[in-house]
Structures are given as C-alpha cells and as structure tokens.
Amino acid sequence: MIDLFYAGWVNIYLRLEWGWSVVGSVSKTSQIPGFYRLSPVERLKLVKEFAGLSEEEASLVGSMKGLSLELADRMIENVIGGMTIPLGVAVNFLINGKDYLIPMAIEEPSVVAAASNAAKICRVKGGFTTSATPPIMIGQIQLTSVVDPNWAKMVILESKEEILALANAQDPMLVKLGGGAKDLDVKVLHTLAGPMVIAELHVDCRDAMGANAVNTMCEAVAPLIEQKTRGKVYLRIITNLASKRLARAKTVADKRALGGSNVVDDIISAYAFAAADPYRCATHNKGIMNGVIAVALATGQDTRALEAGAHAYAARSGHYSPLTTWEKNEEGDLVGTIELPMAVGLIGGATATHPVAKVCTKILGVKSAVELAQIMAAVGLAQNLAALRALSQEGIQKGHMKLHARNIAVAAGAEGSLVDIVAQKMIAERRIRFDRAKEILEELKSVVKQP
Ligand code: MEV
C-alpha cells in the first residue's frame, strides 16, 4: 500500500501479520493540503519533519527569539535589541522535479499565500525549471588622471594575467574551490569629471555572495594598475549590477488551473502594460521582489544588493522593463520566464551567523548558492504570476483587506477570538479603520461586562 503521509512524505507500507508498517519513503512533497489552516506550532512540526530539523533548530524558529543580544551586538554597531518579523513557509513548489518548502520572512500579508497558490497552479504542468550562470561578480577599479585613456586601457589589458594573478593571491581558498578572478574588462568613460578608465575584475565567487572577496581583490590590484598607467585610482568596489550572475526560471501555467483562457489573455495584457509603462513596471517588479526578498531575508542575504541589482538590470536597455515575460503557447497555456541578477551566498555574512537564517537554509535543503539563486528566481516568477492573476481578476484588496482588518483589530487591542470578530465586523461594514476597531472592541467588552 502507498499512502500520502501528512508531512509530505510518500511512505510505502507493508502489511505484516501484526498490522501495517512503514518500509521506506520514496520522496517527499511540498504539497500539504490545508497547511494554512493549521496553527503555527502544527505547521512547524510538519516543516521539521520535511526538512529533518533537530528539536533545537525547530524550537529556535518557533520561539521567536532566534538571535541573542550578544550575537546581534557583534553583527552591527550601536545595537539596542532585535526586531522580529514573521517567518512563513510557502508550499507547493516543484522546481526541477524536486519539492521545496520555501521559508519567507516578510511583514506584508498575502505574499506567502500568493506564492503558494501560484506554485500550486504551476505544479499542474510540472512546476518550474531553472538555470543559472556561474556565480561571477564584477569588481570595478576607477582610474583617473590619465591623459590618454585609450592607451591606459590597452596597458591594463596587456597586464591582464599579472593583475588576475595578484587578485587571486588574495584568496587562495576561493581559488582552491574553483573560483577566483577569471577575467578582466576595461572601458573608457567620458564623465562630468573628465575621462576615466574603469577596469572590471570578473570573480567567480562560488558559494559566497562575494562582496568581501571582490573588494579585497580590487583594493589589492589598484596600486599595480596605478603603477602601469601612472594614473590615480579612486573607487575599488563590487558592482551590484551582477549581470554575469544571473538566475533564470520558466514555467507553464495551465489555463484551466488559472481559471480559463480569458485569464491567460488578461495576464498577458497586464504584462504588456508593465512592458510599456515604467510606472506600472516598477510595481510589477516590486511584486517579483516581494518573493525574492522574503526568501533572501529568511536566508540572511544582502537584500539591498539584490534590490539594486534587479532594478538596474531591469533598466539595462535604457527602458525600465519587466524582469518577467508572459506569453501563450500552442495549447493556450500561459508561459512565464524570469531572468535577474542573483548575488546570494551560503557562506559568510548573516547566512552563516544568524541562527534562524541557518535553519531556513536547511529547510530549503539547498547545497549551493547557485541552487538557492534558482529557487529565488522561481519564487519571484510565482509571485508575479499570483499578482497579475489577482490584479487582472478580482483585484488584490479582497484578500489583503482580510489580513489588514486582523492587523488593525490587533493594533486596536483585540486579543484571542476577539481579533476575528472585530475584523469580520469591519469587513462587513466596509469600514476597516483603527477608530472603528476600537469602537467595536468597546461595544463587545461592554456586552461581555453586562450581567
Ligand atoms: C504588492 O506588494 C505587490 C503588487 O502591487 C505587485 C503588482 O502590482 O504586480 C500586487
């Protein structure tokens, strides 16, 4: 007998004389029906089983006290405490034939549910397929005060091997792992402050985000570049426009699962709007980043670097454009793609130090930064699909307002079962406001007080 165990494992049972016994588990699924209806404790129990978390890891996440004051004080300056935001888990993600539960740290309602719903739709036709470039980051060295910038460019290019060797001498461990400085580009810019020569180191960062490695290399090779060109180097810094470190994902969303052929057309029309208008496009891409950044935060990534890279990449043609594409295939299903820079790492930074980020990485079960990058691209694509579907159909306010009303009720002082009662009343009245929540709460309390 084969049975779908609730935690997502497909268990194989054998009928023995004394009853049924589990003899093995062939795979696990992230499709967990009714996950959203469970309590946080029940959900954590399922995630613990799915990801093989220890008691300690699970209770760290569940306790809401994942970061000690002592550790926080070592992470940044002038620490006074910590700020906790909710950690949710998106279900239904099937990526390259493998099931993932997606940890998402975010304060905005609806995002986790939307990602889970879109992933469910995409599952019908096989989920997401992804790919990525090697994890190459670019470091820039700004050379000024050269009278003949094109000559200087040639000199730097002729010294390429020497410069790369000096860069690689800064990080023998990275080189040993197959990474390191691999290439050098040089460009001449004509700027407000006169001509500049920009040398660009291409560094394979392997499983690191790479800012430290790249910045160290840039600083190390700057004197050599100055000496060769007799110019003056100023900036030596990584670029967040990580155009050589791209993650890609694609999916086919079944037209019936989406709600019909008209929904396919409506989503394509919404995408066309974003492609034509930067004002709409900024929000389109923001929706994508809702998913990407939620996973980034959960896994301790540099979220600002990811945001900067994504939006600069979206504007690389000179026309700010969507990071996704949506079109219809021969069967009339909706085909989506995404491509964006994804500078993420598994070693160094908060990923390696923040205890909750470590547990979230374990929940994802990723083995490399490149794998994490691809999952994040798939989540971004799912998030965009969910947003376009909702926006082009019933709008997003209905779903948003339900959670918003609960938040308002809590802010007004409602506790326990009163939260839902106050929220429901405000929704029914279409008056979701703090002052109204307070009034309802007072009314309810006075009713309870009456003998
Ligand atoms: C809200 O956080 C995100 C959306 O505005 C994205 C979009 O408009 O595509 C719903």
Image (tube, helix red, strand yellow):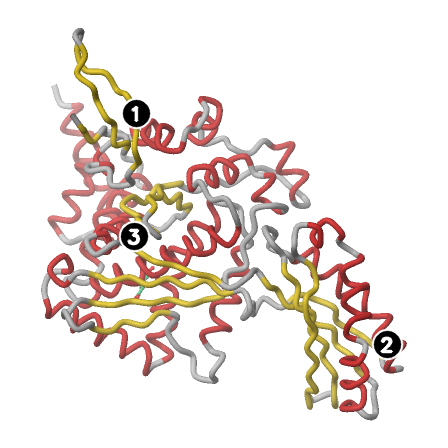
Q: Quadrant of the C terminus?
A: top left
Q: Is residue 119 left or right of residue 206?
A: left
Q: Which residue appears at 78% of the width and 86% of the height? A: 154
* Quarter of the render that holds ligand 1: bottom left
Residue 183 x %, y %: 68, 70
Residue under pointer 1: 24
Looking at the rendered structure, the secondary structure element under dot 3 is helix
Depicted 413 relative to depicted 164: above or below: above
Displayed quadrant of residue 233 = bottom right
Q: Find residue 226 and name its label.
A: 2
**Residue with the most extreme top position:** 18
Q: Tell me the SS state at disc 2.
A: helix
Q: Disc 3 designates what residue?
A: 115
Chain-order first, disc 1 or disc 2? 1
> Image quarter for residue 377?
bottom left
Q: Nearer the viewer, residue 275 or 449?
A: 275
| Nearer to me, 100 or 21 | 21
Which sits earlier in the primary sequence, circle 3 or circle 1? 1
Q: Residue at x 76, y 52 (%)?
A: 172
Mark 2 neighbour class, 10 Å CA radius: few under 14, some 14 to 19, many 20 or more? some
Task: Give neighbour class at mark 1: few <14, some 14-19, many 20+ (Cα, 10 Å).
Answer: few
Name the N-terminal-most of marks 2 and 3.
3
- Label 1 SS: strand
**Could you classify mark 3 by the number of other residues whose Cα lies within 10 Å: few (under 14), some (14-19), or many (20 or more)?**
many
Q: Is residue 129 left or right of residue 231?
A: left
Q: Amino acid at mark 3?
A: Ala
Task: Say which of marks 3 and 1 sits in front.
Answer: 1
CA separation in Å, label 2 and label 3: 50 Å
Residue at 69% x, 52% y: name it: 174
